[in-house]
Structure formats: structure tokens, C-alpha cells
Amino acid sequence: MPQKSSRSRLAALAVCAGAVVGANQVHASELVFWSVWNEPEPQAVALRKIMSAYSQKHPETSFKVVWNGRQNQTKLRGALQAGIPVDLMDADADQLAGGLQMDGLGYDLTGELTGETKSAFLPGVLDLYAVKGHYIQFPYIYNTVNFWYNKDLLKKVGGSVPATFDELLSLCRTTRKAGKDALVIEGNVGFYNVLYFSNYLERLKGSGAVVKAFEDKSGAGWSDPAVLAAAKASRAVWDAGCIAADAPGFQYPAGQQTIAQGDTLGELVASWLPTELSESTGKDFSWGAFNFPAVADGKGKATDLEVGLLSFMVLKNSAHPKEAASFLNDVIGEDSQKILVAEGGVGVPRRGVAWPAALADGQTAAANATALSPFGGGLTTAYPEFTSNVLHPEFNKMFLGKTTPEEFVSTLVAKTKEYWDSHK
């Protein structure tokens, strides 16, 4: 027995040292990756191909993947508390910024990213979630917030892409006269609907206006007349007949399905919409997108863009941070980005890699972006608690006609002061 135990220990040490057992080489570093995707999803298929290609080029590195789905960050917190080793993870960038990154659990990638990597990104993407010039997140999927619409239906109703908000309301009336609805919403998805408010306010005051209003700890930031104007403009889309009267009752994804059915022209949402509707629309559906239009006397540009990114993050307590960072340098490479486009059907942050044809207008918007802000203006990123508990539900009540724009603004003023008073 003692001799057998000694041989077992020696064998274990040999394996740990990377010895070859039979015909199988043991990898020197196994990167443990916890993912926001479910294993059957196209994005997961793309990532598996990217990891496989990386291991072929770097046979010393392998991957162990846990496909957690949308609760990835929550599950990862439990794993970290239990001492389970994880090297890298991915998540919605906004949620990650307001979660694990804010808690200081990310590894600083700044010194690990090559000059080629940094220059590969489209304007503003890598810097969007940087902290004082330090890179904690690594974006790898790029969603643009636009009005996504049916080009064929726009032509059929005799409309044109609006350059101003007033032209958008005019398009709504034109579409209604043709017997169709211009826009649709999901009545139960407040973080989609608030895009009307955040985009209008940013067109008036410039990128970052939503966060700036909230960070006035007296609450008076919301008393700026531009805030009430943005709230009233959000209600104006109803007054102009842009949205079907029964839309408040839609439960996701009932609203977006009306686009696939040809009853509605489009929706203000991110560029994941064509991918989500691909089975319903088919390959011949003619997708277009236009930015939130300009507003009168606005400081923001119509080329300023809200985005929804997906990012990797290397964990601070990773056993292999440099190996994980090496993999991320590869993820932004042309070959890997093309795999994401072809298999995942998504937009990507690398310059010069064509997005799926249905997302072409989104890529144009990304390439020409003059300023970037996170989805919904960035409040979710910096202050997720206030956003989910106050801004989204209070806006949705106002947007759906249960309160007035004035009451909405008053509530923001009071709740913001209350928030900061409790966070002294």
C-alpha cells in the first residue's frame, strides 16, 4: 500500500507538471470561463470556435466553460464567495460596470493590451468603461441603440428617414394614414421605453446628461427645463399616434413581433432586435436603422450614440491573468471577430470587420459615432439601484399615461435627494 500511494503521488505531480500521459498532452493552464450565454445560443457557438482556434495556436492553454446564461454575474458572486476559482467571465457591460467592476473584482488589463489591440477598437468603445485610464472590461460584442425599422414598409407608406424629432412625429402621422403603426413598445419593459427620455435629453444637453442630472445631490439636476422637455417629448409620440393604442398591454416579445408581421414600422431598441426576430422575419426582411434624430436648439449631435456592449472581465483573483489577457488580445483579432459575426449574428467592436447585412446601418452609426454613452444614458452603469427602483418604473408610469411629465420630474427630484441623503 505505501508503495502504491507513492506512485500515485508521483503520477499526480507529473500531470501537474504538464507531463504527457499516453497520447494526451496535459495543458499547462486551463482557463476557467463563466459565460452569460446559454450553451445552444449562437453566441456560445461562436465563442467555442474562437476558444478552439486559440487553443490550436496556443496548445499550452485550454478552456473550461460554464454556460450560466443571464444570471452569470449573480452565480459568479456565489462562486467567488465559496472560493471556486474562475479566471474570466462575460456579461452585459452596463451590469458588469455597476456590479463586479464597481466592487473592485476585476483585473487591470491596461498593461496587458497590445498597441494593436487598443487601436483595433471602433471610436470610444474601449474607453467607455475605463476607470481613470485603466481598462477593466474588454468589450467584444457591439449593439447600437437606434430606431430599427422595415425599409420596405417605409417605402410602401411613402415615408422617409427623419432628421429631426419633428420629422419623426410627422412620419408617425404618415404611417398611420397608410393604416400602419410607426412604432411599437413592450409595455412591461421599462428599460427599453426609457430610451425615448434618455436620448431626447442627450440630444438637448449632450452625452452624459442623464448621469449629470442625477449627480446633483440636491435633486435639482432634474429641475432643468430640458428634463421636463424630454419627458413631454416622450409622451408626444403617443399624441402623434406613433404607437398603437393597445401597445401598453404588450408583454415582451409581443410588441416586436408586430414588426415581423408587417403591422409596425419599427422600434427604438438596440441592434440585437434583427437577430432576435430572425426566425420570424426570414432572410429577405429589409432591415434599416436610423439614429435618434436631432432636436431643436440641442447641444447633442445626432451622431452621438447610446450603446449596449457585451464585455469580458478577467477576475482579480485569477490564477492565470496574463494567459486570460492573451486570449482577449486574440478575441479582438480579425479572425475571431469574423467568427462572432458569422456564427453569432452580432455586431463587433473591431474596425473594418463587416457586421451582418441586417445590421449594416448600425455599423455605420458606430463608425461615425461622435460620442458614446451606455444604454439608457448610463445611469444603470453608475447607479443601478436608483435606476431599477426609481427611474425605470417611474418613467414607465409616466410614459404609459398613469402620471404626468410634471409628476415624473417631481418624483425624480424628491427621490434623488432622498437617495443621496441616505448615502452620505
Image (cartoon, rainbow, N blue to C red):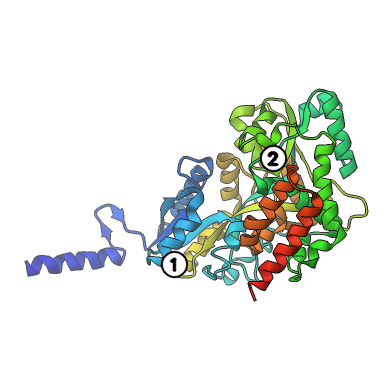
Residue under label 1: 320
**Which of the image's four quarters has the C terminus?**
bottom right
Residue 303 visible in the current orientation: no
Which residue is found at the position 42% from the left and 60% from the top? 31
| Residue 410 image point, x, y percent | 78, 59
Residue 367 visible in the current orientation: yes
Whole-angstrom CA distance, mark 1 to mark 2, is 36 Å
The residue sitting at the left extreme is: 1
Mark 1: amino acid? His
Vertical placement of residue 148 versus 135, above or below: above
Which residue is found at the position 63% from the left and 53% from the top? 309
Q: Disc 1 or 2, which lies upstream in sequence? A: 1
Residue under label 2: 359
Viewer-closest of 7 and 263: 263
Viewer-closest of 54 and 349: 349
Q: Do the residues labelled 1 and 2 touch (CB within 8 Å)?
A: no
| Residue 327 image point, x, y percent | 51, 59
Left or right? Give the position of 330 relative to 193: left
Vertical placement of residue 375 versus 137, above or below: above
Vertical placement of residue 245 versus 375, above or below: above
Left or right? Give the position of 320 relative to 180: left
| Residue 136 image point, x, y percent | 58, 66
Viewer-closest of 359 and 377: 377
* Callout 1 crowding tier (Cα within 10 Å): few <14, some 14–19, many ≥20: some
